[in-house]
Image (cartoon, rainbow, N blue to C red):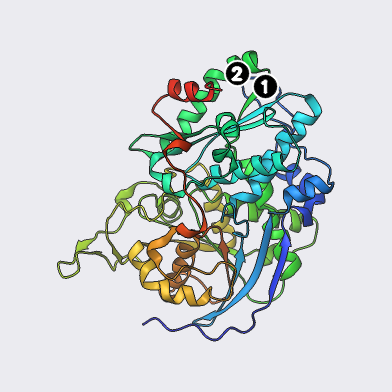
Amino acid sequence: MTSPPLPATGTETAAGNLILDHYERLSAVVAACVTDPSSRPEAEGFRPAFAFPALDSATRAYYSAATARWQHLGEYRGRPLTLLDLTGNPATGTTKTFASLLIVARAVEHIRRTGTPVMLCTPTSGNKGTALRDAVLRALEAGLAEPHELRITTLAPLSSRAKLRRSRLSADSELQALNPLLLLDSERPEDVKPLARAFADAHAQAWARDTGGRLWFSLELENYLVADAARAFFENRVDPCDHGPKRLHAHAVSSAFGLLGYHLGRAVLEESGESLPESRPASLLVQHLNTPDMVLSWKYGSFDRSHLPGYTLDPATGLHVQHEDPAFPQTVHRLDEVLDPTFYTHRPATSPAMNELIGRHGGAGIVVSLQECLERYPLISGLLADTSARLPGDPRTLTEWSLVMALTGVLNSVDRDLIGDGPVIIHGSGTYARDDYVAVDAADYHVVRSVEDVAAAVWKR
């Protein structure tokens, strides 16, 4: 039986800016995870250097959206719960803000140093593209670059359309033409990745010849690790974990970039002697049934869905039910359920690294269903009621489920004895509802199906 949460032991909130507060550490983080931080200036395989603009009033204004909050939520069955809220940028509602600001800042620094325009090209399930577009707009509005110098092409699955937001990049006709938003009509959402890569590879030379600029395919792990390392620095400043029970960090994941970045930050702190290696927290991976690949890999060493437990249909409810494996949903509507299209990566290349970290520092994985999230929704709403990440009263209006998934995974893991009895830190990586933004409409995007379609839309300007 599910027990109610205990009254909060305190509502203290610590806040900070993950980028500005730790700007001087960026070089150490880059050195720890990037083999070659130099620029690749050639058109094919272009990449700006891992160099960031000097801080002045304009760059500080640009980075001001990189806020984070640390807030105690009370206890659940004796486990203290703390929210690491990474959703504070109202233009995105997700943790993708942090990496996107640094990615676009590198493009800005390259433009300043070389005078060469940069067009970012990124595939996305929705949130990454929204955050990069917001970062580009923030850079333009801060005067860090001109509209023809800094641009972005975003390719998302058509199934993610409801998650995509209107902004001045859509409303302003010139900016819309310079920064095309493309939606891929495909049965496989993850096809956006090879298609965006194929476009960048096929047209990099022609783009350089025709525009004098560079296409940057920005989807690389290191681009995200650098920003996410600051989560560990923030934790170490506001609530160090070297003493006391071992913690567990919980995160709803597709490829676990956020947790990998956190562990990178911990490694930097341990190398400098600021944290003890033995206090490194464990990790909890939370996924949904459409893409449970990281949990399967952690538990079975394989992405093979044959390892999923056997479900039976309950004729009284119409739900699929199982009780043999506590790491998977006990009740679910569909066995290939898409709880949130944000989580769309099959066979992530990051699984071996995450498996190694869990093997060394502890942790687990769990898959949750929409049915389980809805059952937990009133309890989760109560836990978040006094935070800046509070939920809408009607779950049907929620369009980003990451935070609810993470908390459902934690509560289920506690009830099923999958995790220890220490404190749990929940990474609030995303939450927003329909009333939090204006979704794009048909005039804001181009539907594409091929490299040729992408090229036609990008070259339209």
The residue labelled by disc 2 is 207
Say whether residue 109 is left or right of residue 351: right
Q: Quadrant of residue 279?
A: bottom right
- Residue at the far left in the pictured view: 315
Closest to the observer, 206 or 3 = 206
- Look at the picture and state if 445 lies above or below 204: below
Q: Position of residue 149 (x, y in %)?
A: 70, 28
First-in-chain label (2 vs 1): 2
Give yes or no for contact between labels 2 and 1 (Cβ–Cβ under 8 Å): yes
How many numbered callouts?
A: 2
Say whether residue 250 is left or right of residue 281: left
Tag 1: residue type?
Gly
Q: Quadrant of the C terminus?
A: top right
Q: Quadrant of residue 191?
A: top left
Q: Residues within 10 Å of mark 2 (few under 14, many from 20)?
A: some
Give the number of the disc on residue 313: none
Q: Quadrant of residue 200?
A: top right
Q: Residue at x 71, y 66 (%)?
A: 15
Q: Position of residue 82 (x, y in %)?
A: 60, 72
Q: Residue at x 65, y 25 (%)?
A: 46
- Look at the picture and state if 141 lies above or below 185: below
- Look at the picture and state if 74 lies above or below 412: below
Q: Position of residue 127 (x, y in %)?
A: 52, 48
The answer to whether any part of residue 260 appears in the image is yes
The residue labelled by disc 1 is 213
Q: Residues within 10 Å of mark 1 (few under 14, many from 20)?
A: many
